Image: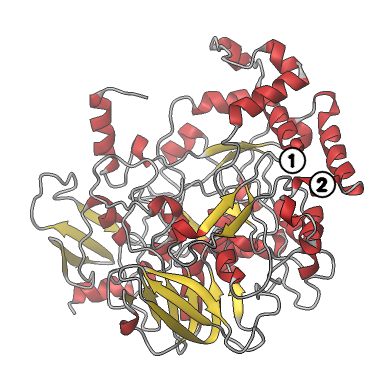
Amino acid sequence: MSKAANVITDTYFSVFKQAFDKQLEPFGKSVMDTTVDGYNLVESKAKVVFRRKTDRKENTIAGKVFHFRMSKGCHFNDCFLSFGLGASATGDNAKRHVSELNNNYDFIIVGGGTSGLTVANRVSAAFPSKSVLVVEFGEIVHIEGQFDPPSTGRKTDSRAPSGQLLGGCSAVNGQFFDRGSKHDYDTWTEVAGPDFAKKSGIKWDWKGIYPSFKKSATFTTLDRAATKQYGYTWHHSAYSNDPKSVQATLPPFQWADIGVKIKAFKEMGLKAVKDCANGEKNGICWVTASQHPVTAARSHSGIAHYANVQPRANYHLLLKHQAVKVIYPRGVKHGPPIVQVRNRVDNTFANLTAKAEVILAAGALNTPIILKQAVSAKHLSSAAQNIRRNATFKEESIAQFYETPAKGPYTLAFGNNAVYVSLPKLASAGLAWKDIVSRIKKSVLDNSFVEYLPVDLRNEKTIVSGYKHQLLTLAKGTVRLNVSSPGLGAEMDLIMDYRAGTNPVDWDLHRAHLRYLISDTPTYKALGGVEWGPGKTIAKDDELLRQFVINGLSPHISFAHPCCTAAMLPEDRGGFVGVDLKVHGARSLRVVDLSVMPLILGSHTSSTAYAVGRRLRR
């Protein structure tokens, strides 16, 4: 290996693979080569320089030299991130047939997604003598960012929208990287009851989970001009300084109306919060995107927790295999279980053996289906809802995206600004929020809440008990196994019903939300804003506005962020795992994905998935 390659391996490496994913076609060879797809790697004092050897007309960065070095909580103008790389994600540790595997592994992790790869990285690093295998349904696929220019050369995959690829949903989501309010996580502990965590001492309240949030992502700021122009604010203390971790940033571009929107919300009585990532999430927030601050390429679990940490001899990956079930040949008291997998190419089945534990991270929809066939229980899932311009502008924007650092509109992902409003603020007119709370309390006292469950579950005592304690999430959906075609592919196995809006209080909340947004602020009036609907007559009438909301939102009141299908609750409250994430009554079996959430958050969910993965203790 050349001196340059040694420099690279010894350097922190979080950017290189992302940059090449974005700017070149996947190179498909070991990145430990001294030449990678026409680039030679040269040591330049304390920096690593990447220089293009030959010109390619279709590549807008031909001839550019990249200089990056390690930064720690400083502005991009003043210091830079490292620009190194780990082994290619298509290297020797990625397997595609069981014949390539070891005879057994200490830990088998089902699901190479957001939390699964987080756990695999941590376990394989903490125990170098222990072997780790991740079973992944999909492939290594290079996915574009939420708002990348067309024809970037990165591949897509028809299965990608449902997270069926390395990196899971973190590789395909909107990159909106917010966290829940501290009250969301404090409620997780409250809903489980006072005795649930006493023996272990493991706390899932905000104080307990916040350190995992901090360690799971690295935030790097931009140049001071962009910060001043848009009024970005943040707390560096809410993030780590690990260059290999998932990257978070605020982009160098926002649309011109962002200041107008912020001003209007302030006129509606909302206050700007410096950084909502530290649990104080009530008002107007800047929200980071999970992307790299230099290249604006998507940052996800497949990069941070697999590609960036390879080569690691004890960390293997089995691609294009579906985990069908976990099997306890001698009963659930005798584990670890066997993991039965299906090769999605030739439809053959095989059994995999773990010596220490099996860890399920197949996602909130697939994990309960796997568990269902191993442990007798029924589960509920809750779900939360989550311009044409001229050609010259488009061409300029694409060119800006390929600058270093990336600039312009294409550095935006799903957006970076949001407002989070409490119920008393949202429904303050006529003390309507108290009416909503009273309706929820009444349904608990007279047990009428049971009628909002599916008919076949209304007599299941543990489910009824769990729902009674989880009424902060009003509607409860289901995910079930399609018994007519079990094990024939995840896309055919599931019968999913979000059941959103089945509790009438759901519509009361949406009505309050809409009424709050109908506001004649000075900014709105100054710009000559015109209301399209619902109109003043409907807005003033509770029933007419309720019907307007129902007609406008049905059937799309909720369609994303499924969770809570194997909830971290006591068994007598319908729970499936304990605070140590171990499955109740089953030996050597854990769950680490969003199915363990007992309640949905007032937030997008990817950052919480990373935090859950980091909470798995030695």
Which is more N-terminal, label 1 or label 2?
2
Disc 2: CA contacts within 10 A as few (<14), some (14-19) or many (>=20): many
Amino acid type, label 1: Asn
Q: Quadrant of residue 46?
A: bottom left
SS for callout 2: helix
* Residue 526 coordinates in the image, percent (x, y): 57, 11
Q: Residue type at mark 2: give it.
A: Phe
Contact? badges 2 and 1 (CB < 8 Å) = yes
What is the image's colouring? secondary structure
* Relative to 301, residue 520 above or below: above
Q: Residue at x 31, y 74 (%)?
A: 96
* Residue 7 rendering spot, x and y as whole percentages: 26, 73
Query: Relative to 92, is 451 above or below?
Result: above
- Residue 449's tag is 2
Q: How many marks?
A: 2
Identity of the residue drawn at 65% across and 28% down: 550
Q: Is residue 422 visible?
A: no
Residue of label 1: 503
Q: Residue 50 got which mark?
A: none
Position of 397 with respect to 222 (left or right) is left
